[in-house]
Amino acid sequence: MFIGEYTYSIDEKKRLAVPPKFREQVGKKAVLTKGLDNCLFLYPEKEWQSLVEKLSSLPLAQADARGFVRLMLAGGMEVDLDKTGRILVPDYLKEYAALNKKVVIAGVLNRIELWDEEKWDTYKKKIEREVGDIAERLRELGV
Amino acid sequence: MFIGEYTYSIDEKKRLAVPPKFREQVGKKAVLTKGLDNCLFLYPEKEWQSLVEKLSSLPLAQADARGFVRLMLAGGMEVDLDKTGRILVPDYLKEYAALNKKVVIAGVLNRIELWDEEKWDTYKKKIEREVGDIAERLRELGV
DNA sequence: ATATGTGTATTCTCCGATAAACATAAAAAC
DNA sequence: GTTTTTATGTTTATCGGAGAATACACATAT
């Protein structure tokens, strides 16, 4: 399980370090893809497999599902970690998530999320403001 | 079960002592994360696991749930107790809870809460003022 | 076949951060 | 009153990130 939030710089060659605490869990190969809310998702090989299975089961007839599957699959890219634990972020993903120099790397359950620092701050502030209400609504779900 | 309220100083290296009465129950590793009402939650490993299970079952497609999971997970951090029973509070959590030197450490059922002393006093006074009304409302819930 | 260019991979070093070990002083327990 | 526990402070050594420099692979052109 991934947990915690770190900030790293993406260098001019679009290389980005995976935090040491995550490296072992990620392994040598991972999949980087477009996520929800303008961030990127980074999945370890195994987690990616089980996600793909879920996506496979979505109904082809449903336009929403087609779109989502296309976003995740066509948008994805296999990435390798180099000896020092960095990945290479493809241009089109860097652009999708509007990544600048400072990138927030957040562990969320079975995936790692990459956010542009500014976007992350904005999002976080919004959530923190609303968290009381959200918790009330989630109560129905048993949290 | 955690019970009671203690006050400790957080030092300039952001180390904070876990009260001796809590140490055995907490163990060597714990998870510190953002809580509700601007405090921090400290969970023993086991309690954290069962919380994570609940969070895992929330639907990825629901924006509210995503936000809440991100707050708890990305906001969390594994912390170790050092030889003298202290944890290291990460900068971003210290900031989230606006911790100053004096920190109130309160046992609440299956978790420990960390509060800035001033915020705690204010909150406590507010609750004490409203306790009558609150009790009325809770009666409907069967307390 | 050689030269040149472009982009990626690797290694190295510096500096700062950070956490582990150590030390001291105060308080509590017996 | 002595001993143990606890709270807090200081020092030290290790580790990690960032950037620069180098080495390597591949392509194109001469």
Image: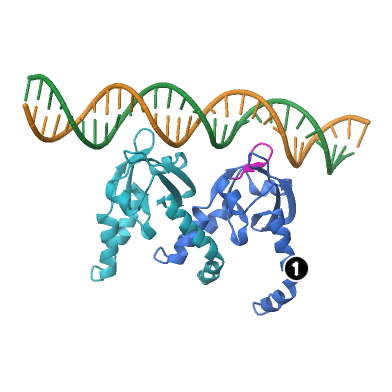
Chain colours: A cyan, B blue, C green, D orange
Residue placed most toward the observer, A75 or A29 = A75
Q: Is residue B70 left or right of residue C3?
A: right
Image location of residue B106, percent across then percent down: 70, 55
Q: Is residue A95 left or right of residue B76?
A: left
The quarter of the picture where the N terminus of chain B appears is bottom right
Task: Examine the rendered structure and indicate whether residue A132 appears above or below residue D30.
Answer: below
Residue type at mark 1 is: Glu
Residue B135 in magenta stretch: no
Residue B84 in magenta stretch: yes
SS for dot 1: helix
Q: Quick check: can you spot residue B54?
A: no
The residue located at (38%, 33%) in the rendering is: A84
Residue placed most toward the observer, A15 or B54 = A15
Q: Main secondary structure of the magenta part?
A: loop
The residue located at (54%, 63%) in the rendering is: A129
Q: Is residue D10 left or right of residue C8?
A: right
Task: Examine the rendered structure and indicate whether residue A42 appears above or below residue A133.
Answer: above
* Chain of the residue under the numbered disc 1 shown in the image: B
Which corner quadrant of the image does residue A10 belong to?
A: top left
The residue located at (62%, 62%) in the rendering is: B37
Image location of residue B31, percent across then percent down: 57, 49
Residue placed most toward the observer, B138 or A13 = A13
Image location of residue D28, percent across then percent down: 10, 35
Residue labelled with disc 1? B128
Residue placed most toward the observer, B29 or C16 = C16
The quarter of the picture where the C terminus of chain B appears is bottom right
Image location of residue A60, percent across then percent down: 23, 67
Q: Quick check: can you spot residue A39?
A: yes
Label 1 CA crowd tier, 10 Å (few <14, some 14–19, many 20+): few
Magenta residues (range): B81-89
